Amino acid sequence: MTEAGPDDGTVHLDLRGLKCPLPVLHARKALAKAAPGTRIVVRCTDPMSAIDIPHLVHETGHALEAKEMADGVLTFRLLRRPLASDQR
């Protein structure tokens, strides 16, 4: 389900087949665990993710760099931004 990219440290989440709320919960957990500057690529098939994941990154202060839909698969590229809570 989760794997690091070959050289760049990008985290890939393959969440295809999972239904709401699981994709957004897995994305939230990955963002919380990732170091600032980490990119997370999320692939999912749940249509609610088109709303839930952009809302998550907006709500938590991270960035949605890209959103694509192809062959029924939604792909999001997220950027884990530094947060004030990282200083603790």
Image (spheres, rainbow, N blue to C red):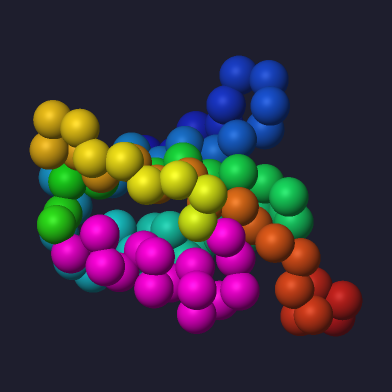
Counting labels gives 0
Query: Residue 5: where, in percent of width, then height?
Result: 57, 26
Quadrant showing the N terminus: top left
Q: In this view, does 20 lie above or below 43?
A: below
Query: Residue 23: where, in percent of width, then height?
Result: 29, 58
Where on the picture, by quarter, is residue 33? bottom right
Quadrant showing the C terminus: bottom right
Please give the name of the residue rendered at 75% of the width and 73% of the height, measured from the top-left corner: 83
User: Is residue 85 toward the left or the right of residue 16 in the image?
Assistant: right
Query: Does the rendering let one see residue 16?
Result: no
User: Is residue 45 toward the left or the right of residue 26 in the image?
Assistant: left
Q: Is residue 64 above or below residue 88?
A: above
Please give the name of the residue rendered at 23% of the width and 40% of the height, measured from the top-left corner: 69
Query: Does the rendering let one see residue 84?
Result: yes
Please give the name of the residue rendered at 12% of the width and 38% of the height, measured from the top-left corner: 72
**Residues in magenta?**
48-63
Please give the name of the residue rendered at 50% of the width and 74% of the height, measured from the top-left corner: 58
User: Is residue 59 toward the left or the right of residue 53 in the image?
Assistant: right
Q: Is the magenta stretch mostly helix, strand or loop?
A: helix
Where on the picture, by quarter, is residue 71? top left
* Residue farthest along the right direction in this orientation: 87
Where on the picture, by quarter, is residue 11? top right
